[in-house]
Image (tube, grey):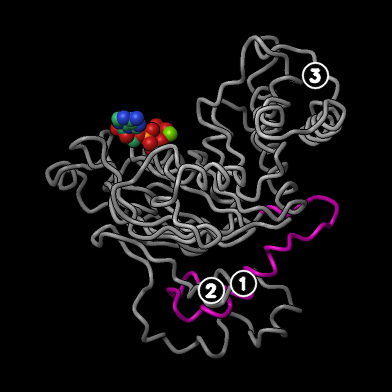
């Protein structure tokens, strides 16, 4: 099993007259981990629900395996949904069922597996999330962190090719969040599934994903490789990733001009150095990491200088030799690229994945 590509093109969603976001365009590369950030209420959960066909966007496409989910039949949608494992934000377990029955639920619902097959799968997934032995406990009897992990086990039982997690780390203490993130990286290495994770945790955003995006002001303000956002000087992106009060994002979405002016000329704080990306334990390699590197190197010249530098600095000596990169920037990217920045700031209305799809 390996992850599949998810392509979203020009997607718009409204409820009645309230537009949530418009013209969202991005590609989740197969097997990679992507993180979606954004202020509360910008429609991140709505986006995940559109991806699995629970909500219907008015415009645009969501393409998986050559099928456009926005326009396909109910029966085809039902089939495609089996590719997904989802951990909803409020993704409550069934309170009256013990953990075993909760985790077994999708198997009983969607497959014709025998109870003994189900037992093996449930045991495997419960072990994977460190809940082996807790099968008979009720959700009300365990901690918040354990409930999250049980939700995770349930999201995994159908061996999903695409995994969507809506704030898996909310309400967890920093140590548990660190364990959870390690678990996600290990899972990704094991399954090569495509991950999209919504989080508000800056440390998660800095260390977990291959790619990141930010929803802001009714559009996808930016989406691309982690280095692109983590080195971005875009006011919205850097305010968000540094958790600062100063910047365009206000308590209720966007500050007005007066509020911004009152802040005066706030110095752009120096960005902290990039933290290294989490790796799987025990020296396991993620298949997606190799594919991603190929692609990122192939399109390095289209990225802003700071992102290029962050990427080349993260290479091993071996990788530098292989890709003809020396020291700071790769030779062919040393001259400032004439290509316009492939990403959009919030003055533009949509964001394109800066990599050409033909490369994957
Ligand atoms: N089924 C629905 N009907 C009408 N409006 C909805 C529905 N679901 C969500 N909304 C609205 O869409 C907007 C975005 O909600 P959403 O839950 O996606 O935000 P979010 O980015 O996930 O926020 P948070 O970070 O707080 O979870 C909100 O204004 C919400 O009220
Ligand atoms: Mg949400």
- Residue at 61% x, 43% y is 82
Task: Decide: few, some or many residues near mark 1? Use Cα within 10 Å; few <14, some 14-19, many ≥20.
Answer: some
From the image, tell me which residue sits under label 3: 135
Locate residue 187, reporting x and y percent: 73, 46
Is 286 magenta? The answer is yes
Q: Quadrant of the C terminus?
A: bottom right
Q: Which residue is mark 2?
A: 309
Magenta residues span 278-307
Label 2 CB-ligand 1 distance < 8 A: no
Q: Which residue is mark 1?
A: 313
Q: Are marks 1 and 3 in contact (CB under 8 Å)?
A: no
Q: Is residue 106 visible?
A: yes
Of circles 1 and 3, the one toward us is 3
Q: Quadrant of residue 53?
A: top left
Local secondary structure at mark 3: loop
Question: Where residue 108 sits in the image (x, y, percent)?
Answer: 71, 27
Ligand 1 closer than 8 Å to the CB at disc 1? no
Ligand 1 quadrant? top left
Looking at marks 3 and 2 on the same chain, the residue that comes earlier in the sequence is marked by: 3
Residue 15 sits above or below residue 190 on the image: above
Mark pair 1, 3: CA separation: 45 Å
Asked whether, in this view, residue 152 is left or right of residue 56, the answer is right
Measured from the top left, where is residue 103 in percent x and y? 71, 26
Left or right of residue 62: residue 99:
right
Q: Tell me the element at label 2.
A: helix
Q: From mark 3 to mark 2, how far is it between C-alphas?
A: 48 Å
Residue 213, quarter of the rendered image? bottom left
Camera-nearest residue between 223 and 76: 76
């Amino acid at each position: 099993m390996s992850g599949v590509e998810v392509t979203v093109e020009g997607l718009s969603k409204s409820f009645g007259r309230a537009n949530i976001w418009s013209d969202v365009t991005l590609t989740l590369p197969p097997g990679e981990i992507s993180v979606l950030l954004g202020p509360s209420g910008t429609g991140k959960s709505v986006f995940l629900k559109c991806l699995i066909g629970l909500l219907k966007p008015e415009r645009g496409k969501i393409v998986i395996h050559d099928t456009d989910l926005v326009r396909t039949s109910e029966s085809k949608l039902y089939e495609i949904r089996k590719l997904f494992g989802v951990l909803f934000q409020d993704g409550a377990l069934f309170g009256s069922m013990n953990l075993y029955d909760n985790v077994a639920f999708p198997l009983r619902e969607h497959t014709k597996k025998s109870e003994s097959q189900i037992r093996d799968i449930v045991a495997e997934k419960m072990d994977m999330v460190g809940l082996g032995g807790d099968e008979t406990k009720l959700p009300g009897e365990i901690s918040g962190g354990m409930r999250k992990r049980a939700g995770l086990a349930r999201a995994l039982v159908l061996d999903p090719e695409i995994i969507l997690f809506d704030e898996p780390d909310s309400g967890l203490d920093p140590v548990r969040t660190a364990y959870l993130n390690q678990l996600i990286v290990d899972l990704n290495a094991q399954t090569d599934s495509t991950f999209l994770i919504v989080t508000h945790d800056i440390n998660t955003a800095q260390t977990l994903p291959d790619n990141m995006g930010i929803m802001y002001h009714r559009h996808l303000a930016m989406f691309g490789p982690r280095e692109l956002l983590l080195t971005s000087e875009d006011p919205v992106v850097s305010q968000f990733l540094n958790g600062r009060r100063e910047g365009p994002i206000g308590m209720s979405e966007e500050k007005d001009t007066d509020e911004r002016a009152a802040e005066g000329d706030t110095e752009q704080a120096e960005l902290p150095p990039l933290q290294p990306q989490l790796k799987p334990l025990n020296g396991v390699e993620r298949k997606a990491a190799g594919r991603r590197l190929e692609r990122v190197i192939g399109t390095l010249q289209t990225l802003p200088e700071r992102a290029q530098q962050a990427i080349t600095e993260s290479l091993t000596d071996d990788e530098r030799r292989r890709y003809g990169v020396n020291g700071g920037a790769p030779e062919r990217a040393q001259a400032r690229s004439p290509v316009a920045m492939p990403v959009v700031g919030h003055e533009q209305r949509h964001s394109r994945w800066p990599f050409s799809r033909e490369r994957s």
